[in-house]
Image (tube, helix red, strand yellow):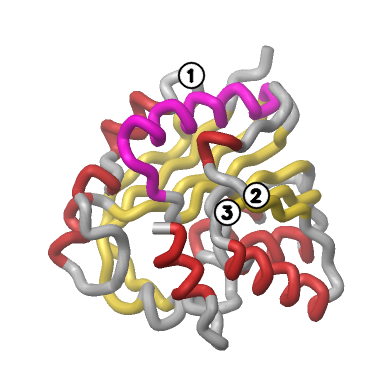
Amino acid sequence: MQEFWNKRYSEEETVYGTAPNVFFKEQLSKLQPGKLLLPAEGEGRNALYAAEQGWEVQAFDYSEAGQQKALKLAQERGVSIDYQLTEADKYNAKPDSLDAVALIYAHFPPALRQGFHRKVVGWLKPGGTVILEAFHPKQLGYNSGGPKDEAMLYTADMLRQDFSGLQINQLEELETELQEGPYHSGKGFVTRLVATKPAQ
């Protein structure tokens, strides 16, 4: 898969566009800027947008081509992001250190997904927020992108269990219209979550 993403991100154009994900942008606007983590961040469209809004951004991906493109765009746009080249199961943050974590199409296999989502809960500060948008299994009936393996797709029940330590503010499964570059284009079916870590 790493080779697949390096090849895709090596294309001259940004494959998912340069504008941030619409749901991410909408939810981020409701929060006070602080420390934000963006796992599986690819070419950096969401990280760059958040940095421009005053967030201190940490991001990672295992695609070197994605990282290079994101850092080049950051330089062009005059913002700074901390973008690490690593895999999800190797990434670590300090407990209670993040104000927000945004998982935007960060699809992981089941064994990795459950453990990583639990780690995310531990990394959040009390009062911190998770913003998630991912493809639902119904996406297999659409041609607008996403993994072709149903085990990599997320349902609301799955996320409710993974993030059981958080207060769920929004959790929905819905059809939406995607306009995120050539690989996320047209009608799609997604699962969305917004959840907050209870204040201690």
Residue 72: assigned label: none
Q: In terms of secondary structure, what is the magenta stretch mainly?
A: helix
The magenta segment: 107-126
Secondary element at tag 1: loop
Looking at the image, residue 140 lies above or below residue 58: below
Marks 3 and 1, Cα distance to the nearest angstrom? 25 Å
The amino acid type found where label 2 is placed reads: Lys
Q: CA distance from mark 3 to mark 2?
A: 26 Å
The residue indicated by pointer 2 is 30
Taking depth in this image into account, of 188 and 57 the one nearest to the observer is 57
**Residue, disc 3:** 61
Image coords of residue 143 (percent x, y): 21, 73
Mark 3 or mark 2, earlier in chain: 2
The answer to whether residue 167 is magenta is no
Q: Quadrant of residue 2?
A: bottom left
Q: Quadrant of the C terminus?
A: top right
Residue on which the image places disc 1: 165
Which residue in the rendered view is the most extreme toward the bottom?
A: 12
- Which residue is at 74% across, 51% downward? 57
Q: Nearer the viewer, mark 3 or mark 2?
A: 3
Dot 2 lies on which element? loop
Q: Residue at x 67, y 60 (%)?
A: 47
Along the line of sight, which residue is nearer the eye, 36 or 32?
36
**Kind of residue at disc 3:** Asp
- Is the residue under label 1 in contact with that under label 3 (CB below 8 Å)? no
Instruction: Check disc 3 and report its element: helix, strand or loop.
Output: strand
Kindly report which numbered mark, 2 or 1, lies closer to the viewer in this rendering.
1
